[in-house]
């Protein structure tokens, strides 16, 4: 199995600040440090689906749109919208969050771009890349926040002492959707107890619904304690409930 190791530990190369870079290396013109903070806790269009991985972990995949306000450097101040896609192993509480952002800057064009971060027990840390309000400037920044898929981002930082991150290993493999199957139990043998509400066969006791096909069959068979039967019961609302009864010769 090929595995990708994604490691974001403090983003040392950025020296814990974000930078706006113009036109690549060419003498490194107009590099300057910028920073901003934001909260985007107004969530909309949030949908989550879950599955079980091949190593029996529960995986939650969530897509959502989150809005709020960013403040700090003038080029990073304004109404903020993030569209995020999170994949979280809820068994171990780690995962990855990625998506796109847009900040409606008052003067100049909007700042916008994409981000990728590691999720670790409710916090994320990663990198944000995009275009600043100045048409000639690119934005490359550390990025961290507290994140919950259902409610969004709080205490977020773009540069300005962004918190260090964790590391996750992302492996290939199937993830099966979680489908609820009723638990079933069966028993064969003599009826040891029988009432209008329940039947017991070979140690298995099942409740008898008042209106069900199984309940209708009981008087037709004229069943009584000592008769040989086979029963099948489904787990319904925490109780074994009679679903099928067959009288044996």
Image: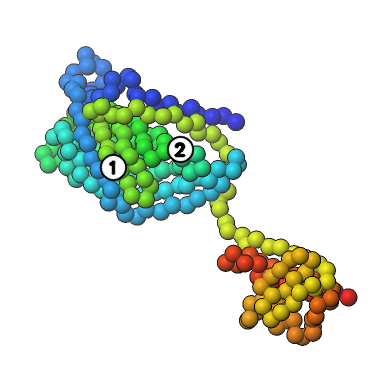
| Left or right of 210 on screen, residue 186 | right
| Left or right of 244 on screen, residue 154 | left
Read off the residue under disc 2. Answer: 94
| Quarter of the image with the C terminus in it | bottom right
Q: How far apart are the two marked residues, 2 and 1, measured between alpha carbons?
A: 18 Å
Residue at the (19%, 24%) spot, across then down: 33
| Residue 132 figure quarter | top left
| Quarter of the image with the N terminus in it | top right
**Spot occupied by residue 54 in the image (x, y as percentages of width and height):** 60, 41
Q: Nearer the viewer, residue 218 or 65?
A: 218
Read off the residue under disc 1. Answer: 154
**Spot occupied by residue 141 in the image (x, y as percentages of width and height):** 28, 28
**Numbered disc 1: secondary structure:** strand
Q: Is residue 107 above or below residue 4?
A: below
Query: For mark 1, does the 10 Å Cα neighbourhood hold few (<14), some (14 to 19), or many (20 or more) residues?
Result: some
Sequence order check, earlier mark of 2 and 1: 2
| Left or right of 227 on screen, residue 93 | left
Q: Which residue reaches farthest top?
A: 27
Residue at the (15%, 32%) spot, across then down: 73
| Total tally of numbered discs in the picture | 2
Residue at the (38%, 24%) spot, across then down: 9
**Numbered disc 2: secondary structure:** strand
Query: For mark 2, does the 10 Å Cα neighbourhood hold few (<14), some (14 to 19), or many (20 or more) residues?
Result: many
- The answer to whether one can see residue 92 in this image is yes
- The answer to whether one can see residue 110 in this image is no
């Amino acid at each position: 199995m090929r595995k990708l190791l994604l490691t974001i530990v403090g983003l040392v190369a950025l020296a814990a600040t974000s930078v706006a870079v113009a036109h690549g290396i060419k003498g490194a013109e107009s590099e300057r440090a910028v920073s901003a903070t934001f909260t985007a806790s107004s969530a909309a269009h949030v949908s989550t689906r879950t599955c079980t991985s091949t190593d029996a972990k529960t995986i939650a995949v969530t897509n959502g749109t989150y809005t709020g306000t960013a403040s700090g450097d003038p080029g990073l101040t304004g109404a903020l919208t993030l569209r995020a896609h999170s994949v979280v192993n809820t068994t171990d509480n780690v995962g990855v969050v990625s998506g796109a952002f847009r900040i409606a800057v008052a003067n100049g064009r909007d700042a916008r771009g994409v981000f990728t971060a590691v999720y670790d027990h409710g916090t994320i840390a990663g990198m944000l890349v995009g275009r600043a309000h100045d048409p000639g400037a690119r934005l490359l920044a550390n990025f961290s926040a507290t994140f919950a898929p259902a409610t969004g981002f709080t205490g977020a930082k773009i540069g300005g002492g962004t918190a260090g991150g964790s590391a996750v290993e992302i492996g290939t493999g199937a993830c099966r959707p979680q489908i609820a199957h009723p638990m079933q139990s069966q028993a064969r043998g003599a009826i040891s107890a029988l009432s209008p509400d329940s039947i017991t066969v070979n140690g298995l006791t099942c409740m008898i619904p008042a209106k069900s096909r199984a309940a209708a069959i009981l008087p037709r068979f004229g069943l009584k304690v000592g008769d040989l039967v086979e029963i099948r019961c489904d787990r319904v609302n925490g109780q074994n409930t009679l679903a099928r009864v067959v009288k044996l010769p």
